[in-house]
Amino acid sequence: MYHTCFLIVLLFAGLIAYLVKFDVMDSQAIMTNPYNKRYTSMAEQTKRGKILSANDKILAYSDSNEAGDEIRRYPYENMFAHIIGYASYGKAGLESVCNLDLLTSHENLMKQISNGVSSKKNTGDTVVTTLDTRLQKAAYEALDDYRGAVIAIEPKTGKIRAMVSKPDFDPNELDEIWDKINSDSSESFLLNRATQGLYPPGSTYKILTALEYMEENPDTYQNFTYDCDGQTIKNSVKIRCYEGEEHGEVDLEKAFSKSCNTAFVTLGSKLNIKQFAKLNNTCLFNQKISFDIPVKKSRFELTARSKKSEIPQTVIGQGNTLVTPFHNALIMSGMANNGVLMKPYVIDHIESEDGIMVKQSKPEEYRTLTDAKHARKIKKMLRSVVTDGTGRSLDTDLYSAGGKTGTAENEGEDPHSWFVGYASGDDAVDGEPDLAVCVIVESSGAGSEYAVPVAKRVFNSYYNNEMKKYYNEKESSNNETTTVEE
C-alpha cells in the first residue's frame, strides 16, 4: 500500500513538473511553430499582415494573384532575405518569429464584424521593425558579391538598424529556386551568417584580451612595452605579425592600433586564465543571447586546465574561439556605450491595420560588460586604430570613429576580413555613440582592405542621411500613439 501511494505521488509530481515545463519553456515554441495546424485555420480567416521598416517602407505584404490565391510579396527582393525571411516552404526570419502576430487582427471591431458578414478576411497586424532601408541598402551594396555579413546597431538603445547576409536569395522566387538554394551546401544561401555563422574573431578579439590585461593590471598596464621584430615564440608556439611586419617598440595602445600579434601574445601569456574565462562569460560567450531571432552560441574553450600551448592563439582571436558577427557587434556596442550592453531587438512594435499600437519594445539594459572607466580606455584605443592604425581610412570630418580590424586565418584559404567599430557625431571617446557596425568578409584578405570600406559606406550613409535627427523626431511623435487595451 505504501509503495502504491508513493508511486502515485511520484507520477503526480512528474505530471506537475511536465506541465510547468510545458507552460514555461515548450508552449511558446509549439504555439509559434509554423507547422502548427492552428495557423492554417487562422490564415483562412485573416490576411497576413505587413512587415515595415523603421523609416516606413514596406518589407513584406500579402497580395492576390489572378486565381485569387494569397501571395506574399517582398519589394526589396534579396536585400532583406535573411532577417525578414519567407512565409512558404516553411518559414524563416521574422516571418516565422512573428507568425502569430501577422495572423492576428486587432482591426476595428465593427470592421471585423462587417468582414465576417461579407465573407472577407480580416487584416493581420503589422510588424514594424527597427531596420532602416537606407542603411540596409548601403551595407548590402558595400558587401557586393562577397560572402559575409554586416550588422548595424544603436549602442544607446539596442535597435538593429541593418542586418545583411550573403550569399542571399529572392524570397519572391522560392518556387523557381528552392531546390537549388536548399541543396547547395557549398554556398549556404539560407544561412543567416550574421546570427548563425561562427568564425574565428581574429584581431577583433584583442579588445577582450586588452580589457582583461587592464583589469588585472590597473596600476601598471600603461607601463607595458614590447619590442616587435615581427615574430616570437610563446609556450612553444611560433606567432608572427601579419605578413611578418615589424612594429618596433610599442606600448599597449600602439600594439592595439597596429594589431601587433607578438605584443599581444606576450601580455596574453601573463593573464589569469580563470579570470579571463570569466570575462568571456560576462561578454556572452558559451551562452544563449536573447534576441528576436535565434543566435548561435559563440565558443570560448580556454580554461585553467587547458594546455599552455593553446593560450598564444586564443589571445589573438585564433585557436578554438569562434564568434558570430552579431555577437561581435554586441561586444562593440557595449564598449561604445561605456561598458553597458543594451538588449538588442529588431521588432520595434506591433500595430493594427488601423495604426493602433498593440505592443511595443523599449530599450533596456542587458548586461554590464565592464565598468565605464575601463570602457573609456578601450574606446581611446579603438580611436587610435582610426587615427594612427589599421583603420585610418575611417578618419573623416563627417564623424568620429573608433574600431578594430581583424584578419582571421581560414584553413588554407584567404583569411576572413573583420571590422568592428562605432561612430559618433561628436567625439568617439567622450561623445555619445550613434552607431556600432560589425563587418565580416569571408575568404578575402586583410580587415583594413576589405571590411573597413564596407563599414565606412554604412557610417557615411547614416550621417549623410541625418538619421539620428530623423529618429529623434519620429520617437517624439510616436509617444502620442494610442495603445490597444489587451
Image (cartoon, grey):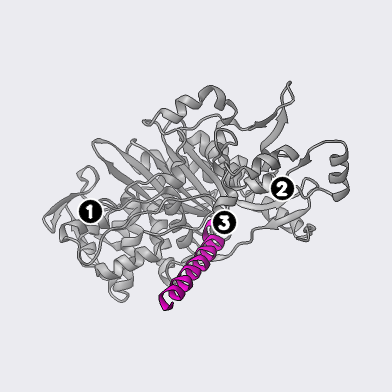
Whether pointer 2 and pointer 1 mark residues with C-beta atoms closer than 8 Å, the reply is: no
Taking the magenta stretch, the answer to whether it contains residue 13 is yes
Q: Going from the N terminus, do you reach mark 1 or mark 3 first?
A: 3
Q: Nearer the viewer, residue 33 or 86?
A: 33
| Residue 458 percent across, percent down from the top left | 52, 43
Q: Amino acid at mark 1?
A: Gln
In the rendered image, which quarter contains the C terminus? Answer: bottom right
Q: Earlier in the sequence, mark 2 or mark 3?
A: 3
Q: Nearer the viewer, mark 2 or mark 3?
A: 3
Percent across and percent down for residue 196 are 43, 45
Q: Is residue 339 magenta?
A: no
Question: What residue sits right under mark 2 in the picture?
Answer: 104
Report the amino acid beneath label 2: Thr
Residue ID at (45%, 25%): 180
Instruction: List the single residue furthest toward the left.
Output: 236
Give the magenta range.
Answer: 1-26
Look at the picture and state if 371 lies above or below 244: below
Work out whether mark 2 precedes mark 1 in sequence or the reverse, and give the earlier one. Answer: 2
Could you say whether the residue bearing mark 1 is in a helix, strand or loop? helix
Q: Which mark is residue 313?
A: 1
Residue 213 seen in the current view: no
| Neighbour tally class for label 2: few under 14, some 14-19, many 20 plus, Cα within 10 Å | many
Q: Hey, what amino acid is under mark 3?
A: Ser
Residue depicted at x 24% and y 62%: 268
Residue that numbered label 3 is attached to: 27
Give the distance between the C-alpha atoms of the residues marked 2 and 1, in whole angstroms: 51 Å
Which residue extends farthest front? 1
